Image (cartoon, helix red, strand yellow):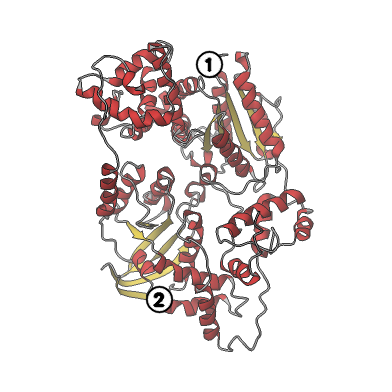
Amino acid sequence: MTNISVSPIEAVNAAIQSHNPFTNAGITKEQDVWGKGFPDVPTLNAQVSDKVFQAIELVRTSQSSQEKVTSITITAQKGVGKTHLLSRIRHRLEREGGALFVYASVNNYTDLSLVKYQFQQTLADSLSKTGSQGVMQWQEVAAAIANEGFKAISTNAPNLSAQDLLERFDKVCISWSAKNKNLMDRLIKEVLKTKLNADPYIVRAILWTLSETQATFAIKWLRGEELAKSNADVLGLPNPSKTNQDREAEALKNIQQILNLVSQYNSIVICFDEIDVKNNCTDNGLSTEIVIANLVKILHDTLENSELGKGIVILTVMLPETWKDKILEIPGGTPDRLSKYTGRKPIDLRNIDGDSLVELVTLWLKDFYEIRNLLPPQKTYPFEEINLREYAKKRPTVREALSWCAENFKVEVKVNDSILPKEPLKRFEIALKIESEADIGDYLDEKNNSIIADALRFCFQSLKGYKLEGETPTGEKLEQVIIEDITEIEPQSINQGWINFKLVGKEKDKLFKIGVAVLQHSNGRTVGAGMWRLIDYERFDLTRGCLVRSKEKKIRKAWDSYTYLNKLVKEYGGEWVSLNKDEIRPLIDIYSVYQKRDSYQLNEEQVLEYAQSLTRINPLLLEILSDPSGQIDEETLEGEELLNDFSKNPSLTEEIDDTDDLSELFN
């Protein structure tokens, strides 16, 4: 085995000075549950995640119908690591299988009179996320249902994987249609032989998720949304116009049908997070906590407890005082339904200890150094393990520990006073040169969204009060543009960090409020989560939305985010500003100088002042501020579509018998 030598300390220190991986690390969001997540310390609150997996095993294997639905309440103060724990559970399920995962961030439930309808949407959206088989969780279920239909035709029918069915489904649909036969009608007929109590339309919609062309519309229908008539006709699904109140009235039945059907094939973990929402209540005065507790009770009491099913585990996460002061005061056995598995006792999360903090810092820095091809002198460098353990004696929360790491992630850079010039401007120029020569890896990677956003925000600060005029490289105009402020996005509980900041100012005395969202994500649904917020001008008090994203990172026409993009650009006067390395790197360098200003003997005001000569001509900043063109680069999007069309054969290559069976799917 070849020994890898420790990297030069100068290179390691330069990396530390260029980026702080702990910045904002203690603030977790919904996308951290579904995305790549963050380094996990398995020993931290292992007793809680172990209990959850024991509950999953119980509902999956128990022969008692009374044990097929159970529940656990998890309590913890803010910052202890609730969302961190849920991310661990979700990622383990994705990695190992064993259950499907449904995540309900109650922060998003803004109208408590529609809580059941909103949970139906949560259910459909969560099952659209990737599961353990590398496909949507809906598609895992659809494949199991389809295989059951095949077995009804012939016990010798092969058991097809979800991937196999996805590759063949549309081709067989086209083949059957050419022979004036309906594949879905035939498949449904076989499936319903063994699913007598299932809603045939829900079964039909789930099976349609196996179609690359129809999955998006099927999921919209499963969310309870109305489809265009042409789409509903193709899917063969009822599509009456409904008010939100109509949808709320029907939502519980739909939720029960979906959960009862899906749990026959796989266990389900449902998690209600962030239920401690302040200043939100129903018309008759019920708080969010009470409304969600009531929903959990209804689900517990009304789901069919078949001993043949795989079971359901419901997790509810809350503050300890919420359990003590609100939940325990609810009459009628609600607390028993919320924490059935642990005998009405919630499980409390613990603060971090010395071993866990050392492990957490080690994992966090492992990613930081690996992407830069560096090997530090010790695994926790620049931290000393003894100092980490000493700090952990204070028993901080995870959030407090990561904030402490952010404040102390630095190295002592010994600079001879005679080397640094006396003039601050000269020191700034030297600092900028040093930062521009540092290797900071692929800074356009989606993992660096926050770095890009922070750099943009800081550099816009340097332009406050400065009048900008002229024309951008793409020909867009700036006429007497003045930035007056850069603010946070409110309400933060709904934004969840997707829109990074708001630019407030005037152009020719006309007020603008531009929401800026850096979305370098590769997953379509993740991009969509940011995009739908960016077009909600009224909620977030915007006059314009600005998507900042590399044009190389395509937005596929099949994604919901493509629809949002059209609305943003063509209806709402927003724009997609292309992100490229040549334009963002200088801004990252300026921000790095600001972060290390003490080492360069500079203060914040000096960095902002000297940066202005660069920021006021930076094409990226000017493009964000300029009047949008109102056009989408369709050529970029269609180019990908053209390549896709030539890289696959849309027709079946083999001869198919003209018989009324489903053998085409498993030939």
Q: In this view, does 385 lie to the left or right of 65?
A: right
Residue in front for this viewpoint, 139 or 575: 139
Name which residue lies at 65% across and 70% down: 9
Q: How far apart are marks 2 and 1 (CA)?
A: 65 Å
- Nearer to the camera, 416 or 484: 416
What percent of the width, then of the height, locates residue 340? 66, 24
- Looking at the image, residue 80 lies above or below residue 595: above
Q: Is mark 1 on a helix, strand or loop?
A: loop
What percent of the width, then of the height, locates residue 134? 47, 36
Say what amino acid the circle numbered 2 marks.
Answer: Tyr
The C terminus: image quadrant: top left
Q: Which of 227 and 21 is in front in this view?
A: 21
Residue that protrudes farthest toward the front in the picture: 1
Q: Name the residue under label 1.
A: 304
Q: How crowded is mark 2: few (under 14 residues within 10 Å), some or many (20 or more)?
A: some
The structure residue drawn at horizontal position 39% and vertical position 16%, both measured from the top left corner, is 150
Q: Residue 423 carries which label?
A: none
Numbered circle sitting on residue 466: 2
Report the number of discs: 2
Instruction: Where is residue 234? Give x, y as percent.
Output: 26, 27
* Picture quadrant where residue 507 is located: bottom left
Kindly report which numbered mark, 2 or 1, lies closer to the viewer in this rendering: 1
Q: In this view, does 3 lie above or below 187?
A: below
Residue at 20% over, 20% down: 179
Spot occupied by residue 295 in the image (x, y as percentages of width and height): 54, 27
Is residue 204 left or right of 406 when viewed as pictured? Answer: left
Q: Is residue 348 visible?
A: no
Instruction: Decide if residue 123 is on the left or right side of residue 87.
Output: left
* Residue 614 seen by the camera: yes
Question: Residue type at mark 1?
Answer: Glu
**SS for dot 2:** loop
